Amino acid sequence: MDYKNAGVDIEAGYRSVELMKKHIQGTMRPEVLTGIGGFSGAFSLESFQHMEKPTLVSGTDGVGTKLKLAFLLDRHDTVGIDCVAMCVNDIACAGGEPLFFLDYIACGKNYPEKIAAIVSGVAEGCKQAGAALIGGETAEMPGFYPEDEYDLAGFAVGIVDQKELITGEAVKPGDVLVGMASSGVHSNGFSLVRKVFPMKEEYLNTYFDSLGTTLGEALLAPTKIYVKALKAVKQAGVTIKGCSHITGGGFYENIPRMLPEGVRAVVVKDSYPVPPIFRMLAEEGRIEEHMMYNTYNMGMGMMLAVEATQVDKTMEAIREAGETPYVVGRIEAGEKGVEIC
């Protein structure tokens, strides 16, 4: 008896690491002090000494049951982007610059090419965020996961000068809400998605005119990474007073997280186009509107609160960074919460 007979192929693990290296290398930053394959990753903070109070910010998350669609369609090169996005968007939401990322892949059986495809997506997400992929772990766990399934999670660390932290404390009546368009469902609410749509390869590969693509492609569209857009707004001289990453819990849970007591956010539904995937989801699942806005991003992946005088500058910076902005509402005095009208 040996480890391979018990279900863990050490040689496959070595091959996975070799296949990953070409993807990982493209994410490196000059601050990275260690190579690939060590026990830990080292990152120098020397270049951030200009900050008055350098402050580390961190985020961790996974992809969730969206992975079930990746299994069904045998498509593994984009879920890594989702994993990175869910972590670095939270860091950017606090005003931070993502510095480095680590991933964790747990699988029933290590198929090196599949693991490399997953990591290629992680590396692409890191490139989009400007973060270095400095480490990770692939755990082969036979008997715990089915052979053809895996889980994917990640952890990111960023930095911000304490005085530039986005806390939402300064949000006040009269401020304007500017939203950035999402790419679709992103990585939240897929347990409901999987109840609404038949989880069969043939159906997921069906082309729908309303979507302009197959259902599977629409659902697997990777989560937008807003790091560069938020950085562009900051570099344009705009003070972002509040920032909300619209993830699980949709508008009703996430927008209040950037609000102080005594103010409420008013979002105008018709101020931007809701992507067709959400309309299809609501119709097929007979999901009421409040539940849709309480579960999904409904086409808005990131929401900012800025001074009315800085709206034009904010919109221009977001467009120049390659994202699509909309003025979606305002801040009013009242009980802390969200009104969608």
Image (cartoon, grey):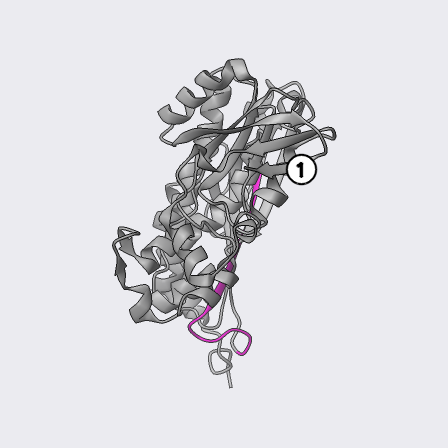
Q: Is residue 228 covered in magenta?
A: no
Report if residue 182 is visible in the image.
yes
Q: Say which element carries label 1.
A: strand
> Residue 242 at what x, y percent from top left?
60, 28
Q: Could you tell me residue 139's position as x and y percent? A: 52, 65
Q: Which residue is mark 1?
A: 337
Depth order, front residue of 206/162: 206
Can residue 65 be seen in the rendering of this structure?
A: no
Q: Nearer the viewer, residue 80 or 219?
A: 219
Seen from the viewer's position, the closer of residues 304 and 177 is: 177
Mark 1 crowd level (few <14, some 14–19, many ≥20, 10 Å Cα): many
What type is the residue that disc 1 sits on? Gly
Instruction: Write down the region rendered in magenta.
Output: 143-157
Q: Nearer the viewer, residue 314 or 267?
A: 267
Find the residue positioned furthest to the front: 341
Quarter of the image where one finds residue 251? top right
Relative to residue 12, is residue 266 drawn left or right?
A: right
Above or below, 178 relative to 278: above
281 is higher (above) or lower (below) than 22: below
Note whether 238 is above or below 125 in the view shown: above
User: What x and y, as percent, mark residue 67?
Assistant: 45, 62
Picture coordinates of residue 317, whole percent (x, y): 42, 21
Residue at left offset 61%, top offset 24%:
241
Quadrant containing the C terminus in the rendered view: top right
Q: Residue furthest bottom?
A: 1
Query: For residue 18, which quarter of the picture?
Result: bottom left
